[in-house]
Image (cartoon, rainbow, N blue to C red):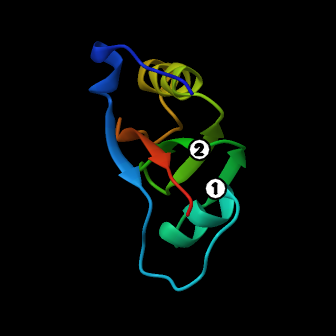
Amino acid sequence: MDNPSSAEAEVVALIWSQHPCDRRHRKEAAFIKCAIPKLEWVDGEGPYACIAWCRVPTATLWATYSEALRAKRDIDYRACGGKCLRKHQIVRIVLG
């Protein structure tokens, strides 16, 4: 398992393991699409999601925390689109 340093660990705001749905999702992409009904798109695979809450929500999934953090830092710096509000977040999806 990927173990972030204590400084990086502060970036993880939430662990998502439940949402108001009776289904048992087997893939993180299915879970996040259901948890965020207005999600425009999701790409990638893995338990770490980098979510952009700007204009329309979008998400990329990553295998490790380090990859998700790198993606978040990239969109924090470059912006995620034309109407970027800098509302970007990393969450860990725990299926079960």
Residue 11 vs 74, above or below: the answer is below
| Amino acid residing under circle 2 | Pro
> Which quarter of the image is occupied by the C terminus?
bottom right
Residue at horizontal 57%, vertical 47%?
59
Between 57 and 93, the one lying in front of the other is: 93
Give the residue number, with chain letter if any, for mark 1: 28
Residue 55 position in % (x across, y down): 44, 54
Q: Circle 2: is it few (<14), some (14-19), or many (20+) Cα within 10 Å?
A: many
Question: Where residue 89 sits in the image (x, y, percent)?
Answer: 39, 40
In the rendered image, the vertical position of residue 23 relative to residue 69, given as above or below = below
Residue 69, image x, y percentages: 48, 24
Residue with the mark numbered 2: 47
Quarter occupied by residue 16: bottom left
Q: CA distance from mark 2 to mark 1?
A: 6 Å
Residue depicted at 59% across the width and 23% down the height: 67
Left or right, 20 with respect to 33, comes to left
Q: Nearer the viewer, residue 22 or 36?
A: 22
- Tell me the kind of residue under disc 1: Glu
Secondary structure under badge 1? Answer: helix
Measured as percent of width and height from the top left, residue 92 is found at 47, 44
Q: Identify the image quadrant of residue 26.
A: bottom right
* Picture residue at 61% right of the left edge, 61% below the top: 40
Give the mark nearest the N terminus, 2 or 1.
Answer: 1
Determine contact: label 2, label 1, CB under 8 Å. Answer: yes
